[in-house]
Image: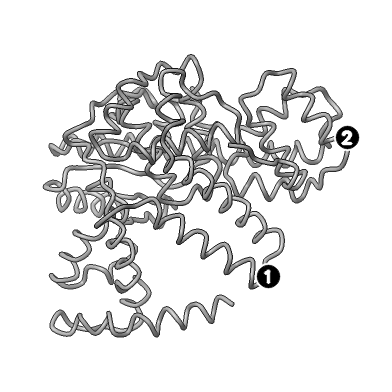
């Protein structure tokens, strides 16, 4: 699959060059050429922020010869990275606190992404951008885990989804996590009870082994490397790879010294029914960030026509999204939206595709917040949905 990088802005080319898995000589030749021509450093800063890769970019820029990057740019990135490091340490401490409290109450907690992933892939929790804390508990422990979060000072952010018994049941079946916020500490927690995206589920209770990651002197359980890689591929794909940091995580797993058992990953992906999604993820990483495909999987990847088609759609969507941000015209926004929906539809097959389409007719959080219907009249939300969708679409324009 060929990708014409010359159609990208110099700033986007520079970001990809810095993050690429090319040899030092090839990488430096590309970087020197781009910087010597012209880089809009304000645009570059906004770009790496939007893609959530500024900690990695700052470390890579720091390794370049002095004078290539304006000092003001480096100082801005340095300050931003310090802030991210402080937040990462705060989140890591809070994650450890919550894990200890829940395990004292008999609840096994699995950390997803976040600080455990940063420690596993980069050896430093500050080298990955920090968002919320994602934890997974067994569905039967969900109510107890929610009570513990409340006792720890958190409150649920979208309570309108679960004000009645019917709403709670619908939320449990259709969603995969609840959102909690600690107002004083400014920390968000996503409490997961399954790993499922619009009908595509990763049944980790059956397939996953766990590993322990040391955070602040405490062992925190997370997914073993092979199911973790599949979870990241599924997560990134379901979110249309809107941030390059998710793909860069995949690249880190694809490096020769990562220790991944690729045969096990392939077998596990086949068992879970996500082989094509997994292969298209590797193709995308290979195309955008030039990381070599695993040798023992290259034949299967090359023969998977749907994986190639999905990777091509991903690249078209990537380009459309960058055009939308560079020139936010109405057509660019509509074009990006249509490509995103088509890509997500092609990711799925059979009933999962119907489930994805039906998802767009379900009442959203804002619908539930706009007007209250009792359980008896809940079906009215479905009748209201087209009008609220149209209202939001007009307001966005």
Going from N to C along the chain, the mark reached first, 2 or 1, is 2
Judged by depth in the image, the label closer to the viewer, 2 or 1, is 1
285 above or below 29? Answer: below
Any mark on residue 24, and which? none
- Return the x and y of residue 266 as percentages of the image width and height: 32, 27
Identity of the residue drawn at 14% across and 39% down: 105
Quadrant of the image occupied by residue 195: top left
Please state if 241 lies on the left or on the right of 229 as rendered: right
Question: Would you identify the image quadrant in which residue 63 lies?
Answer: top right
The secondary structure type at the circle numbered 1 is loop
Tell me whether the residue at label 2 lies in contact with that at label 1, contact meaning CB atoms closer than 8 angstroms. no
Which secondary structure, mark 2?
A: helix
Q: Residues within 10 Å of mark 2 (few under 14, many from 20)?
A: few
Q: CA distance from mark 2 to mark 1?
A: 31 Å
Q: Which quadrant of the structure image shows residue 38?
A: top right
Task: Look at mark 1 in the image and give the residue it sits on.
Answer: 329
Image location of residue 352, percent across then percent down:
28, 55
Work out which quarter of the rendered image holds the N terminus and state it.
top right
The residue at 75%/36% (across/down) is 74
For disc 2, the marked residue is 36
Q: Residue at x 33, y 20 (%)?
A: 263
Q: Quadrant of the C terminus?
A: bottom right
260, 98: nearer the viewer: 260
Q: Residue at x 50, y 43 (%)?
A: 311
Is 375 left, or right, of 357 in this rendering? left
Looking at the picture, does residue 71 appear above or below residue 141? above
Instruction: Left or right? Give the position of 209 relative to 140.
Output: right
Please state if 216 lies on the left or on the right of 286 as rendered. Answer: left
Residue 109 rendering spot, x and y as whole percentages? 23, 37
């Amino acid at each position: 699959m060929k990708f014409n990088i010359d159609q990208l802005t110099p700033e986007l080319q520079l970001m990809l060059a810095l993050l690429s898995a090319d040899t030092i000589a090839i990488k430096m030749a590309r970087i020197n050429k781009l910087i010597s021509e012209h880089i809009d450093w304000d645009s570059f800063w906004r770009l790496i922020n939007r893609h959530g890769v500024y900690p990695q970019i700052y470390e890579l820029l720091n390794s370049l010869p002095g004078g290539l990057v304006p000092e003001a740019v480096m100082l801005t990135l340095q300050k931003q990275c310090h802030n991210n490091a402080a937040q990462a340490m705060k989140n890591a401490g809070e994650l450890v606190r919550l894990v200890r409290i829940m395990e004292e109450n008999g609840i096994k907690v699995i950390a997803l992404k976040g600080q455990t992933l940063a420690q596993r892939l980069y050896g430093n929790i500050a080298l990955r951008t920090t968002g919320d804390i994602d934890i997974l508990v067994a569905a039967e422990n969900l109510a107890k885990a929610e009570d513990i979060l409340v006792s720890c000072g958190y409150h649920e952010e979208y309570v309108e989804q679960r004000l009645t018994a019917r709403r709670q049941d619908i939320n449990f079946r259709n969603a995969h996590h609840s959102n909690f916020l600690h107002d004083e500490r400014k920390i968000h927690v996503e409490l997961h009870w399954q790993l499922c995206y619009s009908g595509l589920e990763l049944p980790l209770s059956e397939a996953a082994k766990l590993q322990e990651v040391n955070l602040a002197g405490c062992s925190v359980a997370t997914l073993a490397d092979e199911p973790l890689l599949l979870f990241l591929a599924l997560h990134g794909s379901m979110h249309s790879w809107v941030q390059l940091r998710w793909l860069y995580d995949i690249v880190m797993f694809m490096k020769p010294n990562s220790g991944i058992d690729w045969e096990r990953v392939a077998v596990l992906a086949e068992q879970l029914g996500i082989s094509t999604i997994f292969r298209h993820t590797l193709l995308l990483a290979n195309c955008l960030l030039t990381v070599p495909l695993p040798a023992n999987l290259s034949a299967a990847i090359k023969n998977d026509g749907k994986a190639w088609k999905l990777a091509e759609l991903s690249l078209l969507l990537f380009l459309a999204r960058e055009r939308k941000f560079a020139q936010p015209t109405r057509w660019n926004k509509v074009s990006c939206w249509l490509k995103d929906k088509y890509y997500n539809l092609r990711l799925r097959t059979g009933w999962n595709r119907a489930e994805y389409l039906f998802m767009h007719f379900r009442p959203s959080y804002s619908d539930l917040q706009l007007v209250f219907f009792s359980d008896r009249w809940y079906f009215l939300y479905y009748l209201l949905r087209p009008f609220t969708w149209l209202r939001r679409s007009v307001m966005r324009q």
